[in-house]
Amino acid sequence: MSLAGGHRDFTKGALPAQAPYNSSVPALRPYRDEDFNQLLAIDHTCFVEGIAYPEEELRFFLNKSSAITLVGTDQNKIHGFVIADRFRSRQSANSMGRIITIDVVPQVQGTGLGSMLLCGVEDELRRAECGYVSLEVAVDNQKALRFYKKHGYSVLKTLPRYYLDSIDGLLMGKKL
């Protein structure tokens, strides 16, 4: 079942069940329109101006019918989110996924929420019959590079002056 804006309904057991007796266990849920301001604030906390998404661009990605957006919560407070998109290229019979952004507030980084978000969106991309996923990351973001490599992503190519028209990016990918 689809939710408004094309987001997937996870109530049918698509995501792992969370222990109801322990509210401090992070949970994943689909994006809701009322989450927007919190997601925008988190993105601007995680990334510098020029890399963080402007309001209009973040809304654009969230509202795409092909978007998959998961929100990581703990005690009903949003601590992170991931947005992915799925598409089919002309040369391929299979769909592909692209991670637009994965953001975890600095105070919660290292707790496993980022891994939960990444694995959750990869599972949803597999369910959408994507055989491959890609993402971009700045060459100087060593923490993110270690994180993606730990999750099986490989560097595919360098993207010259990708960020702020001065910092190279790396295109990374993974077979799902």
Image: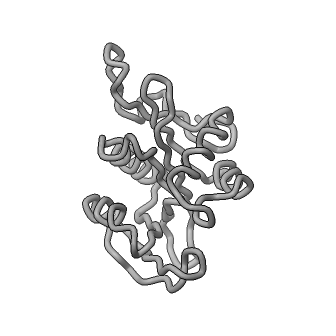
Q: Quadrant of residue 2?
A: top right
Colour option used: one colour
Furthest-left residue in view?
A: 150
Q: Quadrant of residue 16?
A: top left
Q: Residue at x 32, y 20 (%)?
A: 19
Q: Residue at x 56, y 51 (%)?
A: 43
Q: Which sits in the foreground, 84 or 23?
A: 23
Please tell me whether residue 16 is drawn above or below residue 50 in the rendered image: above
Q: How many marks?
A: 0
Q: Quadrant of the C terminus?
A: bottom left
Please tell me whether residue 140 is drawn above or below residue 5 in the rendered image: below
* Left or right, 49 with reference to 128: right
Q: Position of residue 122 (x, y in %)?
A: 40, 52
* Left or right, 91 with reference to 133: right
Q: Position of residue 55 (x, y in %)?
A: 71, 52
Q: Which sits in the foreground, 94 or 154?
A: 154
Q: Which sits in the foreground, 13 or 41?
A: 41
Q: Position of residue 15 (x, y in %)?
A: 40, 35
Furthest-right residue in view?
A: 56
* Left or right, 42 with reference to 155: right
* Left or right, 61 with reference to 138: right
Q: Residue at x 25, y 60 (%)?
A: 150
Please tell me whether residue 173 is drawn above or below residue 130 in the rendered image: below
Q: Residue at x 39, y 73 (%)?
A: 140
Q: Quadrant of residue 151?
A: bottom left
Q: Quadrant of the N terminus?
A: top right
Furthest-top residue in view?
A: 21
